[in-house]
Amino acid sequence: VQVQGQFFMVDCGEGTQLQAKKYGVKLSKIDHILISHLHGDHFYGLIGLLSTMHLYGRKKVLNLVCPPGLSEIILIQMKHSQTYLNYKINCIEWVPNEPQLVLDLPKLTVHTIPLHHSVACSGYLFREKPKMRRLNAEVIPERLNVAQIIALKNGEDILNDDGTIKYENKAVTLPAAREFSYAYCSDTKYLPGLAKMIQKVDLLYHEATFMEDMKDRAENTFHSTAAQAALVAQSAEVKQLIIGHFSTRYRDLNLLLDEAMLIFANSSLAREGEVFEIK
Ligand SMILES: [Zn+2]
Ligand SMILES: [Zn+2]
């Protein structure tokens, strides 16, 4: 996930490093890794990635947001392989079953979204903070200094020496861009109550391991169907839905997409390498 120049890795299965290389994702830019739960397909790539960051000479602190127990797993692996990382990991272990603020950064926040899976599992809600007003350069006749630019972006007027208004803010700036939001809902059984935690997000990723013909199987294995993912999207009134985490039994993923689209039209498949941009 990329937000205003900040890079987040959300879950880290085997093969993550190969895919990062293939799609040109710079590992050195990633300052935050968020793990949803401790099933192998969501974190078995992590130790390798942490070691690679070390070998590449990383010095910056890495924020690791994760379920309880992951720091212990990492420490044991590092201890017995006598690996000493040359950077610090700031481990933020969340409490299961309650929404919690886990990252409060200058431009955005990330909260956990408690899910219902066979082990402790949380999704993540990314929300941009209010943005600054934008300068309308076309109507400003002179070059402004940095202090003046910051003042205008903060919504203040620019004054003359005698205290009269030189540039009225509204006349020379445009409204701030809207704040965007993204909800990542990892492995979970159908949770109708999820909708109220992710109301009106711009983009929702929701797992869809099965189709409705395997509804019982989904229930028993704490997973969802494509239709259930779409129902969550519909009742949360999100703008766009991405479904993923498909069972390998489905050769034709369009069947899952069709099932979702019958309920929520603006649905897409999370295909390998696909990029979704919120504008
Ligand atoms: Zn799982
Ligand atoms: Zn999984």
Image: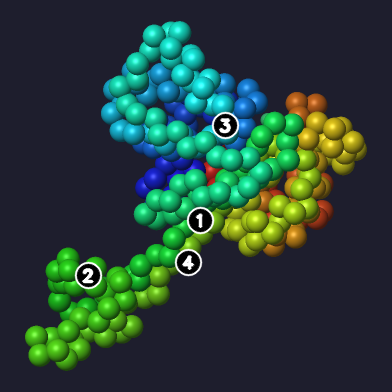
Point out the tag, 4 or 1, that comes first from the N-terminus: 1
Measured from the top left, where is residue 155 in percent x and y?
Answer: 31, 76
Q: Identify the mark at residue 68; answer none if there is no mark.
A: 3
Q: Amino acid at mark 1?
A: Arg
Point out the tag, 2 or 4, that comes first from the N-terminus: 2
Cα–Cα gap, marks 4 and 1: 11 Å
Element under disc 3: loop
Q: Amino acid at mark 2?
A: Ile
Element under disc 1: strand
Of circles 2 and 3, which is in front? 3
Measured from the top left, where is residue 177 in percent x and y?
Answer: 43, 67
Who's the residue at 84% across and 37% down the image? 219
Q: Quadrant of residue 78?
A: top left
Q: Which residue is mark 2?
A: 149
Given residues 250 and 97, the one toward you in this image is: 97
Residue 62 visible at all: yes
Whether residue 114 is situated above or below residue 156 in the rendered picture:
above
Q: Identify the mark at residue 127; answer none if there is no mark.
A: 1
Measured from the top left, where is residue 142 in percent x and y?
Answer: 15, 76
Cα–Cα gap, marks 2 and 1: 26 Å
Who's the residue at 20% across and 89% down the image? 165
Point out the tag, 1 or 3, that comes first from the N-terminus: 3
Q: Which residue is mark 4?
A: 178
